[in-house]
Image (cartoon, rainbow, N blue to C red):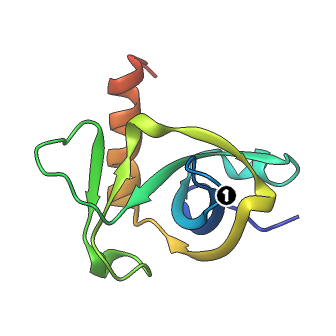
Amino acid sequence: MKNVDQFDIWMSDISYSQGEERGSLYLLILQNSILNEFHPTVIVCPMTTNIVSGSEILRVYVPGESTQIEKACDVVIDQIRVIGTERLVRKKGKLPMEYAEKVKENIKIVMDIDI
């Protein structure tokens, strides 16, 4: 089992929906660390270097110097998904807490959750 913690950033191996082409994608782990110890799937948000300004609720901007990705990126809040842990290829680092808190806040807004 991989050592996967909440708010880790992982490089993943996922299939693109177009044909047989495969590509890599950065993912932010949302699922809590205790569940990650034994569960074969993980809840994630994709991250993209295709920055979209003016979308502060559906995306959380993360400056490049804040992560080991070394490029500015957006955490894409409206594309939460579940993947198998076997798709996680390499841990790239951890999202700084100030951005993790913003991700949590935006998920609550998008899903209309009061916790």
The image shows residue 55 at horizontal and vertical percentages of: 18, 41
Instruction: List the single residue furthest toward the front.
Output: 19
Q: Quarter of the image containing the N terminus? A: bottom right
Question: Dividing the picture into quarters, in which one does residue 109 lie?
Answer: top left
**Residue at 38% of width from left, 16% of height from top?**
112
**Residue at 32% of width from left, 46% of height from top?**
102
Residue nearest the observer in this picture, 96 or 18:
18
Residue nearest the observer in this picture, 65 or 72:
72
The image shows residue 9 at horizontal and vertical percentages of: 54, 66
Question: Dividing the picture into quarters, in which one does residue 89 lie?
Answer: bottom right
**Residue at 44% of width from left, 81% of height from top?**
68
96 versus 109 height, above or below: below
- 61 vs 113, left or right, is left
**Residue at 23% of width from left, 59% of height from top?**
51
Instruction: List the single residue furthest toward the left.
Output: 54
14 versus 92 height, above or below: above
* Residue on which the image places disc 1: 20
Residue nearest the observer in this picture, 48 or 2:
48
Instruction: State the SS at label 1.
Output: loop
The image shows residue 18 at horizontal and vertical percentages of: 55, 50
Question: Dividing the picture into quarters, in which one does residue 88 lie?
Answer: bottom right
